[in-house]
Amino acid sequence: MNWVKDFYQKQYKWMDSTSEEKDHFELQVERIDTLKSYSNSTNQTILELGAGEGYFAIAAAQAGYNITVIELIPEAVNTIKHLVQKYKVKDKVTVIEGDFYEVKLDRKFDIIFYWDGFGIGEDEDQIRLLSRIKEWMQPSGVVMIDIYTPWYWAKANGERMKLPKIEREYGFNAFNCRMIDTWWPLNQEERKVTQSLRCYSPADLKLLLKEVDLQLITCEPGGSFDYDSWVYIKKAPLHQCMNYLATITL
């Protein structure tokens, strides 16, 4: 997992920053709806792993929730702290800079989120993280994790795209069932960095969760991108989606 910090630091630096904050917050509406559907009170405590720039955390705080976030990248942590001050939610958001494989937490949470990033390392690493998540859960707690699907990423192998500041290429390691995501600044392919994430079908995820005595309750399919028509499909069937949101309990 030596690639992780370098990749995410460069991803943060290279990502197009021209989007307005309102656009980022609009993307959180569905996530907040998901939070509300599993929450019976804003008194419930929330933990987010890999918070990025913190827009979900800010939106959750504005909805009345107390949320703790763990983020590895210092630049992203600074952005979260800036947004916390800007939107006056300091009393609702606790920011922890660190590696969630290593950080120590002295409390338990009602709802835990891990958006867009599960699958770093090998199965043993997922088991280690899931064991930590289990320790952080309240007995009646729920965990929501985005899981990448093998069928979508196998089909996306070789696809390239150009964004305003970067280029990306997707690959797929069929033997190890991993999506490969390579980024580089526009016209500077020699500077490329790559992330590799393990993909799991729901059946495979159940086997993984069995190792730590956790239960897969539901799978909510996410979107899909049609590279032939260059159209994003917001909700795709499970057998076509790029990821699904797994709901997990004790």
Image (tube, helix red, strand yellow):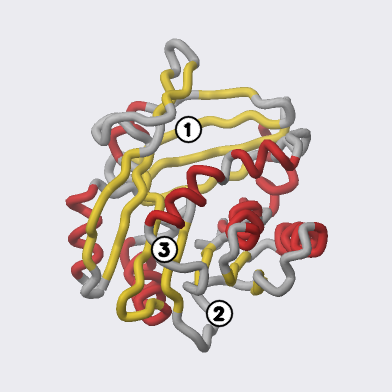
* Side of 61 relative to 88 (left or right): left
Residue marked by disc 3:
39
At horizontal 24% and vertical 46% (from top left) the residue drawn is: 201
Q: Quadrant of the C terminus?
A: bottom left
Q: Is residue 146 above or below residue 235?
A: below
Residue marked by disc 2:
103
At horizontal 42% and vertical 73% (from top left) the residue drawn is: 110
* Side of 220 relative to 65 (left or right): left
Residue marked by disc 1:
170
Q: Say what secondary structure mark 2 lies in.
A: loop
Which is closer to the viewer, label 2 or label 1? 2
Query: Taking the image as drawn, is residue 176 in sight?
Result: no
At horizontal 56% and vertical 56% (from top left) the residue drawn is: 3
Q: Say what secondary structure mark 1 lies in.
A: strand
Distance between mark 1 and mark 3 Cα atoms: 36 Å
Q: Amino acid at mark 3?
A: Ser
